[in-house]
Structure formats: C-alpha cells, structure tokens
Amino acid sequence: MTETPKQDEKKGLAGWLFGRALHIYFLLTRSMTLGVRAACFDRDGRLFLVRHSYIAGWHMPGGGVERHETVEQALVKELREEGNLTISGKPQLFHVYFNNRTSKRDHVVFYRVEVEQTAPRRPDREIVECGFFALDALPAGTTKATFRRLQELEGAMPPSDYW
C-alpha cells in the first residue's frame, strides 16, 4: 500500500516533532550529551546505513549513551536496535567529535566496526529504512557528515574535531 504525499508529510512532521522533543528532554536532563556512531562494514566491505523518521538523510547507525552505560555498551545496544547488527571482533575507536550542529553540548564517539546482521531490520517509527551499500553506490540522500567520516577513515583527509 503506497502512502499519499499528505500521509508522508504528516509522518515527516511527526518524526521531526519527536526528534525535537528528544533534544528538549536531553537539554533539561543532561548537562552534556554523549552519543556513539559507527561505520559498520560487513564481510563484503559494504557500509550499513539507516534512514530515520525524524531527520533527513542516510546516516551511520548510533545513538545516545545513557547513564550507567559505557560507550561500548551503548554502541552494542544501538547497533542491535537500529540494524539487528552484532559486532565481530573489537570495535576500533576512530575519533571523538563535537557535534555543535545539534547543540552546543553534544559529543559523538565514532567507531569503525565489522558487523554481521542477525536478521533483516523491519521499518518502525524510528528507522524507516536501512541496509548495506557498496561504498561506490551509497543511496541518494547520504549525509555530508557520512561522506566526510568515510574520507577520514580512508585517510583522504585528517579527522575534524567537529561532526
């Protein structure tokens, strides 16, 4: 069943409101926000990306680090939740970024990981689409930040301190 443009617009607005509500909640409950993201590669060298309901574009999976949770625990949790992914081997810490586009208090710990998908990830209210993509065939709408992180991982440019 295909949705009408009006239904797509309502979903987009609802997703945007959800994202803003989360940021306001974090603003009120935390002095600094900390998140994790990962460049997740399968055994064929394809990159796993997600498309959220509340923000435009294709992104590397990740999310917030909760109280009483280590960064690596958050990474494992977010990859499982956003893609049914399990990490093979040890995650490789790449860099820590200041994400001043989200807020003046947000930091992102970025990893490179090898992953396996335990089952296909079905769309829901948070993740509307996801999948593995060849590096030379990333989907339209892949974010500029994702392309920058990939260039940094390749060594084509030095890591920025800003997401």
Image: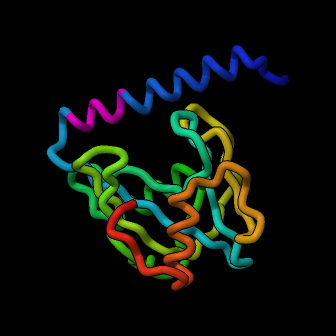
Whether residue 161 is situated above or below residue 108 in the rendered picture: below
Q: Residue furthest right?
A: 1
Q: How is the image coloured?
A: rainbow
Position of residue 91 measured from the top left corner of the image (x, y, whole percent): 44, 77
Horizontally, residue 97 falls left or right of residue 55, namely: left
Residue at 27% from the left image edge and 57% from the top image edge: 69
Residue at 21% from the left image edge and 54% from the top image edge: 68
Camera-side residue of 85 and 20: 20
Whether residue 37 is situated above or below residue 155 in the rendered picture: above
Instruction: Tell me which corner region of the image, top left, top right, bottom left or bottom right, holds residue 116.
Output: bottom right
Horizontally, residue 2 falls left or right of residue 20, namely: right
Instruction: Tell me which corner region of the image, top left, top right, bottom left or bottom right, holds residue 124.
Output: top right
Q: Residue furthest front?
A: 157
Whether residue 121 is situated above or below residue 88 in the rendered picture: above
User: Main SS of the magenta segment?
Assistant: helix
Camera-side residue of 45 and 106: 106
Position of residue 140 measured from the top left corner of the image (x, y, whole percent): 72, 51
Residue 25 on the magenta span: yes
Position of residue 79 measured from the top left corner of the image (x, y, whole percent): 51, 58
Residue 38 on the magenta span: no
The quadrant of the picture occupied by the C terminus is bottom left
Camera-side residue of 42 and 4: 4
* Number of disc labels: 0
Q: Which residues are magenta?
A: 21-27
Horizontally, residue 141 falls left or right of residue 37, namely: right
Horizontally, residue 20 falls left or right of residue 122, namely: left
Q: Residue furthest top?
A: 6
Residue at 61% from the left image edge and 50% from the top image edge: 58
Residue at 61% from the left image edge and 17% from the top image edge: 10
The quadrant of the picture occupied by the N terminus is top right
